[in-house]
Image (spheres, grey):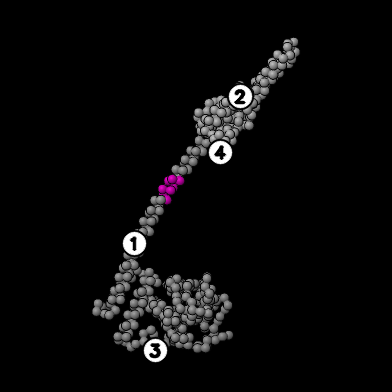
């Protein structure tokens, strides 16, 4: 088993005691030295910024090592760490104040100058139950940690303050207070903390007074933001309420439209049933007329009259029979769609009379000019005159036929 070169304590390392942050190109690792010293370091080929922290890795090592109810110690290798993100600082806060982990001493070493002030800030704001120290290398860091773990007090010069008591010590103390105050505001968002203010004649007074003003400004900004958010909340609630009212009104309107549609549907069904009865009656009457006309034709054939007169009478009878059959076919072909077509045509062209509406329907149903003329009881030439007048009433271009126009109108209803 590997041992620590400074303490000779066993070093436990497992392949799964690591964490790879999403999107990052470095690996965070933990080792256990002895039974309660954690060694944290990153594996990277270039300087990196720590972006996210998760205490899951610490809990994994604790669980797999069987460490319980013991003060913990941490060596933190800062090699290749050039910056620490705000999100990572929030993670540090979680470990210190919410995780339930009892880190008695934390020692940072191999600290790059670019992030030394961040570590010093953390050291200044750490709770009294935690000692945070900065050292140059692993040997110095481990030696210091072992001294603290054994209860040995650090010698002079081993803490953050390196000067003797007096002006130097006071300056170091003011620096710690300054950094801790800044950290509580920026890391913990403690905008209501009481700011320590040295005496007015102290050279440090302007700096702490500036922090005091900054805290007031940040509180005012938060209050403004809260008011804006409240205003937006009220405004959005009003808009939502209005939308709900409109939606409910639309639903009620839809219900009324459905009710009206059902009423129209029932009326149309009733109308169709009546028309079917009427068509049955008409079909029966037309059939009886056609049968009677056929009987008359048979009787005419037996009359002893001049052949030319007989032929003329027979042609008239046949014309009457054909007209009746055409009328029967027209009436039985009518559908609900044809009724809707006539209604739309009449609304669009109220100047069309009943005969012209009938002609329009027969044109739509593909009856030829001779059949239409016979159905309405006029000559083919008279039918041409009616079509001419209809062309003008429909306001059609001379190159557009009535049939084309009526077909397009019917297609719009589909």
- Per the image, the residue denoted by label 2 is 381
Residue 244: within the magenta? yes
Neighbourhood count class around disc 2 (C-alpha, 10 Å): few under 14, some 14–19, many 20 upward: few
- Per the image, the residue denoted by label 3 is 155
User: Which of disc 2 and disc 4 is earlier in sequence?
Assistant: 2
Tell me the SS state at disc 3. loop
- Per the image, the residue denoted by label 4 is 412
Question: Mark 2, mark 3: which one is toward the viewer?
Answer: 2
Residue found at x 57% / y 37%: 408
Residues at discs 1 and 4 in contact (Cβ within 8 Å): no
- Per the image, the residue denoted by label 1 is 224
User: Which of disc 3 and disc 1 is earlier in sequence?
Assistant: 3
Neighbourhood count class around disc 1 (C-alpha, 10 Å): few under 14, some 14–19, many 20 upward: few
Q: Is 225 drawn above or below residue 286 in the view shown?
A: below
Question: Mark 1, mark 4: which one is toward the viewer?
Answer: 4
Residue located farthest toward the left when viewing the structure as drawn: 201
Tell me the SS state at disc 4. helix
User: Which of disc 4 and disc 1 is earlier in sequence?
Assistant: 1
Q: CA distance from mark 4 to mark 2?
A: 32 Å
């Amino acid at each position: 088993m590997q041992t620590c070169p400074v303490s000779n304590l066993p070093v436990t390392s497992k392949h799964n005691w690591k964490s790879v942050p999403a999107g990052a190109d470095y690996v965070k690792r933990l080792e256990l030295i002895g039974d309660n010293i954690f060694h944290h370091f990153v594996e990277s080929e270039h300087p990196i910024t720590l972006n996210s922290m998760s205490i899951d890795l610490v809990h994994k090592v604790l669980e797999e090592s069987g460490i319980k109810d013991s003060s913990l110690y941490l060596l933190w290798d800062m090699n290749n760490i050039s910056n620490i993100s705000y999100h990572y600082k929030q993670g540090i806060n979680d470990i210190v104040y919410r995780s339930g982990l009892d880190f008695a001493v934390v020692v940072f070493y191999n600290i790059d100058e670019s992030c030394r002030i961040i570590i010093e800030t953390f050291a200044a704001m750490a709770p009294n139950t935690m000692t945070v120290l900065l050292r140059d290398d692993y040997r110095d860091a481990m030696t210091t940690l072992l001294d603290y773990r054994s209860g040995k007090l650090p010698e002079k010069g081993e803490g953050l303050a390196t000067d003797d008591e007096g002006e130097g010590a006071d300056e170091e103390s003011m620096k710690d207070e300054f950094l801790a105050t800044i950290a509580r505001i920026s890391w913990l968002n403690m905008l209501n903390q009481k700011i320590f203010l040295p005496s007015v004649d102290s050279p440090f007074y302007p700096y702490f007074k500036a922090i005091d003003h900054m805290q007031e400004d940040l509180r005012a900004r938060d209050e403004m933001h809260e008011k804006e958010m409240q205003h937006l909340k009220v405004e959005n609630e009003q808009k939502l309420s209005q939308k709900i009212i409109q939606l409910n009104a639309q639903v009620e309107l839809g219900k009324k439209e459905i009710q009206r549609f059902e009423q129209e549907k029932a009326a149309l069904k009733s109308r169709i049933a009546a028309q079917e009865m009427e068509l049955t009656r008409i079909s029966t009457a037309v059939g009886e007329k056609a049968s009677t006309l056929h009987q008359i034709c048979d009787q005419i054939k037996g009359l002893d009259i001049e052949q030319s007169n007989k032929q003329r009478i027979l042609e008239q009878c046949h014309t009457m029979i054909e007209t009746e059959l055409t009328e029967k076919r027209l009436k039985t072909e009518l559908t609900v769609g044809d009724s809707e077509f006539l209604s739309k045509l009449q609304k669009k062209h109220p100047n069309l009379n009943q005969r012209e509406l009938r002609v329009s329907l027969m044109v739509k149903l593909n009856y030829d000019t001779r059949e239409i003329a016979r159905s309405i009881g006029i000559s083919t030439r008279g039918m041409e005159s009616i079509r001419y007048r209809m062309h003008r009433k429909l306001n059609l271009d001379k190159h557009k036929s009535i049939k084309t126009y009526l077909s397009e109108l019917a297609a719009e209803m589909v």
